[in-house]
């Protein structure tokens, strides 16, 4: 074949001559080189394949031994190694790609006693381990140290505020009862308007641009007309994520904010309750096990009932007569119930329902009243493979509202 003079480094047999740091290497044919590439890649991938096939995993849930509630944002790790995980809002942890061998599964966090559990990891094994921790305390003479558990920073989420009942109760409450609506008002960019039916405005957006979720169900009227109280009982909340910007697309069509609120389960160990009364409203909470949770694990079920009733329209005639002799025009009632069933492996099925009402009668101006009730269900499935949790929601909801304007001096139209 004729030599190609345009490319002097390539001849008729397609030989390539390489120069590395000015040291010439003997020419080799491109065809022969290509034959070596698959073998070389196979040798590189073979160790990784062998290692992947020889690893195991350990996963499970972390519970409070006293009431059976999940313990959130707590480190769970294998002692003496770099393997570890952080529990999520359901108390779930998962430690993957663990080499076979004997380990000590350790839980160490503020407020609870340290737990050490010996485990054995086999190749291709997914070990399920439910852990129950006991609350503990250390008496210090001159220093008191406390800390709030945080979720592991696995992704950057801008403008997200995590709210727990402890934080809500730390804010001075109007009416003697801490509430999510009052806590939100101390956040930057949040404005409430009580005289417009409990509207919430976040960073300039209108009320319809906000999305409020309760256990996965959309709540269209989350705040009462007075603007100081929400439909959510603080004592039944587990966690609330408030997104004021940059929220994920899976939350749907809202463009101002998203509030994802999760309620806790009823006590799985014993019956309990709470009764409280203030000058604004009264509250009743009752919870307990349907099937008690055992120390060694196993299935369990529980219930949770919450009821709030406002009598401000009556009590204000006596206590706040300097505002209006006829009393303040606000009244509301909130009911929430939940039944939780937990499997031995951590899988969970929840049924919940609610009935929220609000009435605001502004004399000679307008009447604002609405009623929202619904029923829903969600479940968490822990399959053998893959490691991730599977969640799903079912919801049925009914909303009725009636806003009627009044005119003190009717005008006749001819």
Image (cartoon, helix red, strand yellow):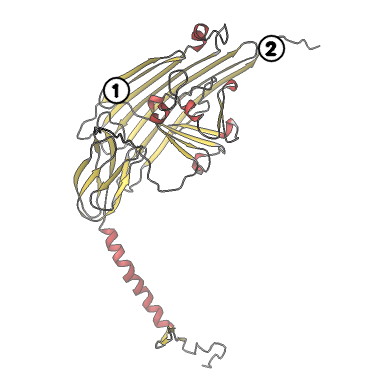
Q: Nearer the viewer, residue 251 or 238?
A: 238
> Which comes sooner in the sequence, label 2 or label 1?
1
Q: Position of residue 85 (x, y in %)?
A: 32, 47
Instruction: Find numbered disc 2 in the image and state the secondary structure of the residue it sits on.
Output: loop
Q: Quadrant of residue 267?
A: top left
- Tell me what residue is drawn at x 46 percent, y 37 percent: 161
Residue 128 percent location from the top left of the image: 25, 44
**Which residue matches tag 1?**
288
In which quarter of the view is residue 177 placed? top left
The residue indicated by pointer 2 is 407
In front here: 238 or 372?
238
Residue sitting nearer the eye, 5 or 155:
155
Q: Residues within 10 Å of mark 2 (few under 14, many from 20)?
A: few
Rendering coords of residue 167 (x, y %): 41, 31
Quarter holding residue 194: top right
* 19 over 279 or under it: above or below: below
Count of residue discs: 2
- Could you tell me which secondary element the residue under label 1 belongs to? strand
The percent coordinates of residue 269 (x first, y second) are 25, 26
Image position of 368 with respect to 250: above or below: above
The quarter of the image holding the C terminus is top right
In this rendering, would 133 be left or right of 328?
left
């Amino acid at each position: 074949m004729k030599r190609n003079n345009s490319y002097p480094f390539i001849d008729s047999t397609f030989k390539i001559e390489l120069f590395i740091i000015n040291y010439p290497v003997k020419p080799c044919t491109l065809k022969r080189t290509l034959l070596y590439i698959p073998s070389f890649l196979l040798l590189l991938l073979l160790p990784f394949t062998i290692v992947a096939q020889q690893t195991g995993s350990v996963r499970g849930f972390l519970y409070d031994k006293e009431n059976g509630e999940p313990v959130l944002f707590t480190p769970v790790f294998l002692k003496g190694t770099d393997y570890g995980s952080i529990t999520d809002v359901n108390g779930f942890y998962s430690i993957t790609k663990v080499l076979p061998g004997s380990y000590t599964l350790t839980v160490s966090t503020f407020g609870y006693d340290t737990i050490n559990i010996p485990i054995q990891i086999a190749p291709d094994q997914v070990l399920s381990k439910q852990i129950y921790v006991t609350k503990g305390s250390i008496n210090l003479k001159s220093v008191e140290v406390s800390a709030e558990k945080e979720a592991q920073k696995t992704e950057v989420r801008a403008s997200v505020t995590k709210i727990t009942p402890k934080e809500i109760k730390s804010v001075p409450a109007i009416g003697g009862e801490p509430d999510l609506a009052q806590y939100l008002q101390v956040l930057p960019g949040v404005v409430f308007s009580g005289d417009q039916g409990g509207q919430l405005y976040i960073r300039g957006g209108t009320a319809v641009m906000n999305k409020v979720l309760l256990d996965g169900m959309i709540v269209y009227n989350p705040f009462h007309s007075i603007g100081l109280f929400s439909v959510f009982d603080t004592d039944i909340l587990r966690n609330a994520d408030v997104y004021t910007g940059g929220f994920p697309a899976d939350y749907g069509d809202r463009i101002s904010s998203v509030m994802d609120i999760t309620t806790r389960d009823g006590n799985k160990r014993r019956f309990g309750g709470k009764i409280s009364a203030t000058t604004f409203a009264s509250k009743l909470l009752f919870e307990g096990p349907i099937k008690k949770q055992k120390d060694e694990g196993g299935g369990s079920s529980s219930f949770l009932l919450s009821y709030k009733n406002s009598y401000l329209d009556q009590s204000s005639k006596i206590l706040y007569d300097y505002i209006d002799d006829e009393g303040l025009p606000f009244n509301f009632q909130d009911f929430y119930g939940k039944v939780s069933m937990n499997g031995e492996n951590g899988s969970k099925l929840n049924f919940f329902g609610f009935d929220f009402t609000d009435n605001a009668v502004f004399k000679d101006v307008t009447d604002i009243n609405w009623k929202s009730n619904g029923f829903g269900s969600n479940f968490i499935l822990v399959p053998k493979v893959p490691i991730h949790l599977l969640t799903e929601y079912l919801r049925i909801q009914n909303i009725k509202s009636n806003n009627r304007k009044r005119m003190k001096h009717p005008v006749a139209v001819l």
